Image (spheres, grey):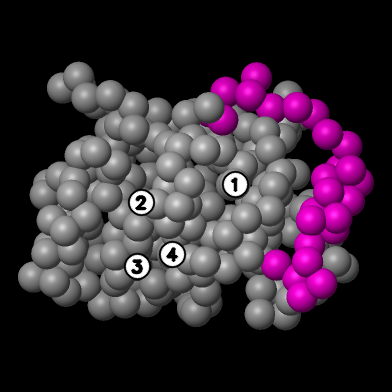
Amino acid sequence: MPALIHEIYYSLSGEGITTGVPTIFVRIAGCSLRCGITLDGRKLWCDTGYALSHKAGTEIKFDHIIKQIESLQPDHGAQVLITGGEPLEGENRQLTVLLCNEFSKICKNQNYPFPRIETNGAESIEGLDNMVFTLDYKLPGSGMEERMDIQNLSILRNRNNPLDELKFVIRDKIDFDRSVHIVHEYQPNTNILYSPVHGEVEFSELAEWIKINPVPQARLSLQMHKILWGDKRSV
């Protein structure tokens, strides 16, 4: 099955160390994880559930994708963020690699010379040098921890890229405590993001957990786009 594009649009980055930075989003359809569905009956909390199915995308010629990215770039350039769905799963991986190889030819902002890849932690990031990663580690509350490729934590550490991020989405205190254990065991040397599951953890509650259990290079990461625009898409 060819990789399919759900949407391409220009906005501001809503999370992590580049929050507020002008960004071109390329959302590829299709992801096999179903985060939030657990054996105790808790429900899906993925905030891009509309892009989980390959049927949610449209096949677009590669050169047309590049032209769309070029047409959306402001004169000073923008960060490019490839997300999903899951951009490294199955056929999506080949498209993501091709896009990153081509991006060096059209990049206008040398502060962001490589596209940022938002990836769910189940797919290997080994050998993908011309990318910057926001790497998820799925915790017990996601129901998907067993799908994590634990080698990614070592790969991320060895990259030693100051723009990389390790992201924990927190559903409850069990998740937070597990994240602290992961950090202590694997000693990541990168930016660490803590984001609350919307409607299940109060921002202030997660903030207190971070204050009481300081993790090196950790920060609270709220979804700025939801604060600004609610549940609107492509804004």
Q: Position of residue 24 (x, y in %)?
A: 68, 56
Q: Is residue 69 left or right of residue 221?
A: right
| Quadrant in the rendering for residue 198 | top left
Confirm or deny contact between disc 1 and disc 3 (CB under 8 A). no
User: Magenta region: which residues?
Assistant: 51-78
Instruction: For the residues labelled 1 and 4, say whether their Cβ atoms are less than 8 Å apart.
Output: no
Residue beneath the point at 83% across and 49% down: 68
Residue behind mark 1? 235
Residue receiving disc 4: 16
Amino acid marked by disc 4: Gly
Q: Nearer the observer, disc 1 or disc 4?
A: 1
Mark 1 secondary-structure assignment: loop
For label 4, the crowd category at 10 Å Cα-Cα, with few meaning under 14, some 14 to 19 and many 20 or more, is many
| Percent x, y of residue 82 | 63, 51
Mark 2 → mark 1, Cα distance in angstroms: 26 Å
The type of residue carrying mark 2 is Tyr
Residue drawn where x is 82% and y is 72% of the image: 75
Residue annotated with mark 3: 192
* Viewer-nearest residue: 228 or 194: 228
- Going from N to C along the chain, the mark reached first, 3 or 2, is 2
Mark yes or no: residue 90 visible.
Answer: no
Tag 4's secondary structure? Answer: helix
Q: Residue farthest to the left? A: 212
Inter-mark Cα distance, 4 to 3: 9 Å
User: Quick one: label 1, few (<14), some, or many (20+) residues within 10 Å?
Assistant: some
The kind of residue tagged 1 is Val
Dot 1 or dot 4: first in sequence order is 4
* Mark nearer the N terminus (2 vs 1): 2
145 left or right of 95 in image: left
Q: Using the numbered discs, state the Cα–Cα distance from disc 1 to disc 3 in whole angstroms.
A: 26 Å
